[in-house]
Amino acid sequence: MISTVLLDLDDTLVDQVRAADAAVVAWAPTLGVTGEPAELARRWAELSEPHYRRYQAREISFAEQRRARVRELAPHLDLSDDAEADRRFAGYLEHYRAGWCCFDDAVPTLRRLRRQGLRVGVLTNGDEAQQRDKLDVVGLTAEIDVLIASSTLPFGKPHPLAFAAAVERLGVRAEEVLMVGDSLENDVRGALAAGMSAVLLDRTDAHAGVDVPRIRGLDELELPEQGPARR
């Protein structure tokens, strides 16, 4: 029986993509980087992903992935000094933080789950300090019971040790946990491989026909009637 529901944070509860897109469009010209808004957003997302993945694999630090991203976006600038790279990246963070907001279905869903007697937490591939700040800014801190950030775990999702460490910290068995998130690999397949139940949140209908439980909005979330699928 499910006793705990873990939800991803970015692009599950919080509209991270919109905040990141708006932030880079506002910030890039201060680095001398210009272009159409959609192109700037696409470029930033594409260059950010591999560096962030390296951070989740603990190949580089959280600060190092930030520096790598700004250096790649603005190769014409001398950002070899870490302090200067950090200073430049701070401009992005200012715009990014200002754009944080949660999806309309986030709070009602969290409250519904807790009314059902479930423990509700966030399992996020992010830095704990930043993600706690994000929860505070968007008004979700009081709506959850626990935050588990990958910066406090051996690895990020979908590494098996990320899920194992989260389950150990919660003090429950894997089969008691339902993981909900927007990433097919990080949230869903990773959780299923760890013995949890999992549901894919596919707001944009990008994964029609996928062989895992799927919802288009959090208001569609229901608890599974039986134990986790084995895949």
Image (cartoon, grey):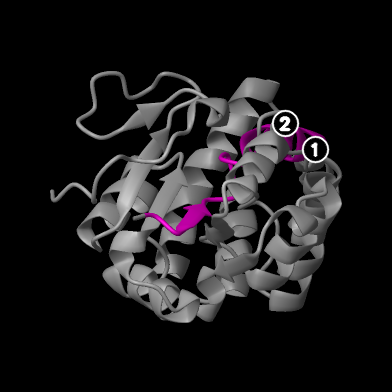
| Whether residue 147 is visible | yes
Disc 2 crowd, CA 10 A, few/some/many (<14, 14-19, 20+): some
Q: Is residue 14 on the magenta stretch?
A: yes
Q: How many marks?
A: 2
Residue picked out by circle 1: 29
| Whether residue 58 is visible | no
Task: Between residue 84 and residue 202, name the one nearer to us.
Answer: 202
| Residue 34 marker | 2
Which residue: 44% across, 28% down?
202
The region drawn magenta spans: 2-26
Q: Position of residue 141 (x, y in %)?
A: 77, 58
Task: Between residue 29 and residue 186, name the one nearer to us.
Answer: 186
Q: Looking at numbered disc 1 in the image, what kind of residue is underneath it?
A: Pro
Quick one: label 2 or label 1, which is nearer the N terminus?
1
Which residue: 55% across, 75% down?
151
Q: Is residue 14 left or right of residue 160?
A: right
Does the CB distance between marks 2 and 1 fall below 8 Å? yes
Q: Quadrant of residue 68?
A: bottom right
- Label 2 – label 1 distance at C-alpha: 5 Å
| Residue 53 marker | none
Q: Is residue 148 left or right of residue 195?
A: right
